[in-house]
């Protein structure tokens, strides 16, 4: 009797165990929600930074700032109305510039740099700003953090999410074919 009961139990378990196993479904991680949160936070940060910059413009009544299509503002300190040539990709320019906070506290004092347009790493806002300039011009740029060093800073003096101001003079332009302009 016990052996019959044992055989019946084994048969029930045997038939019940033949069912196909269903694979486990992966957990659904909500990556899109994370990105949406980061985007919303960055929009708030950019709006606050833009308000701070506009407040600075209201205080600086000596200069007129123009908005660029590349996300920064600029004001001419000296403008060349005669020359028509602005640097292009591959041209070598010599510039003199400084980097400060909006309140003029200095990050980096004036320094001179040879820069190959669009072929060297430089502050993105200044890279685009140089292409607006002509030889001999001096422009003050106000660059929001996302067009400067962003959330990382420069690893030295400029902190994260820092708005920069830079006064830049274009000293010389050497065209790609080594002609001096």
Image (tube, rainbow, N blue to C red):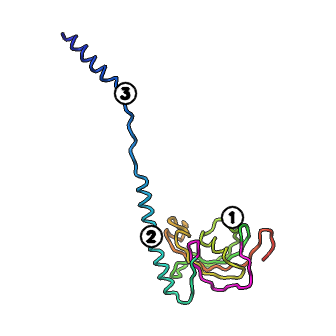
Question: Which residue is pictured at 44% across the width and 61% down the height?
Answer: 38
71 on left or right of 88: left
Question: Which residue is pictured at 49% across the width and 69% down the height?
Answer: 161
Residue wearing tag 2 = 45
Vertical relation: 3 (above or below) 167: above
Q: Are marks 2 and 3 in contact (CB under 8 Å)?
A: no
Q: CA distance from mark 1 to mark 3?
A: 61 Å
Vertical relation: 35 (above or below) 11: below
Residue 17 in the image: x percent, y percent? 32, 23
Label 2 SS? helix
Vertical relation: 8 (above or below) 75: above
Residue wearing tag 1 = 119
Residue wearing tag 3 = 20
Identify the mark nearer the N-term, 2 or 3: 3
Q: CA distance from mark 1 to mark 2?
A: 30 Å
Front tag of 1 and 3: 3
**Of the numbered discs in the image, which one, if any, rests on residue 22?**
none
* Magenta segment includes 84: yes
Label 1 SS? loop
Question: Which residue is pictured at 72% across the width and 80% down the height?
Answer: 135
Q: Are marks 1 and 2 in contact (CB under 8 Å)?
A: no
């Amino acid at each position: 009797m016990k052996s019959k009961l044992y055989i019946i139990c084994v048969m029930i378990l045997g038939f019940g165990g033949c069912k196909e196993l269903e694979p486990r479904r992966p957990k659904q991680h909500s990556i899109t929600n994370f990105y949406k949160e980061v985007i919303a936070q960055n929009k708030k940060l950019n709006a606050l930074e833009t308000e701070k910059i506009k407040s600075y413009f209201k205080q600086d009544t000596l200069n007129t700032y123009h908005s660029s299509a590349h996300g920064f503002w600029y004001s001419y300190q000296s403008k060349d109305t005669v020359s028509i040539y602005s640097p292009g990709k591959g041209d070598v320019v010599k510039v003199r510039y400084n980097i400060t906070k909006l309140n003029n506290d200095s990050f980096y004092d004036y320094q001179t740099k040879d820069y190959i347009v669009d072929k060297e790493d430089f502050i993105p806002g200044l890279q685009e700003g140089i292409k607006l300039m002509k030889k001999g011009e001096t422009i003050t740029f106000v660059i929001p953090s996302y067009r400067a060093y962003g959330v990382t800073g420069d690893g030295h003096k400029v902190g994260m999410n820092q708005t920069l101001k830079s006064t830049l003079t274009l000293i010389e332009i050497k065209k790609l074919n080594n002609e001096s302009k």
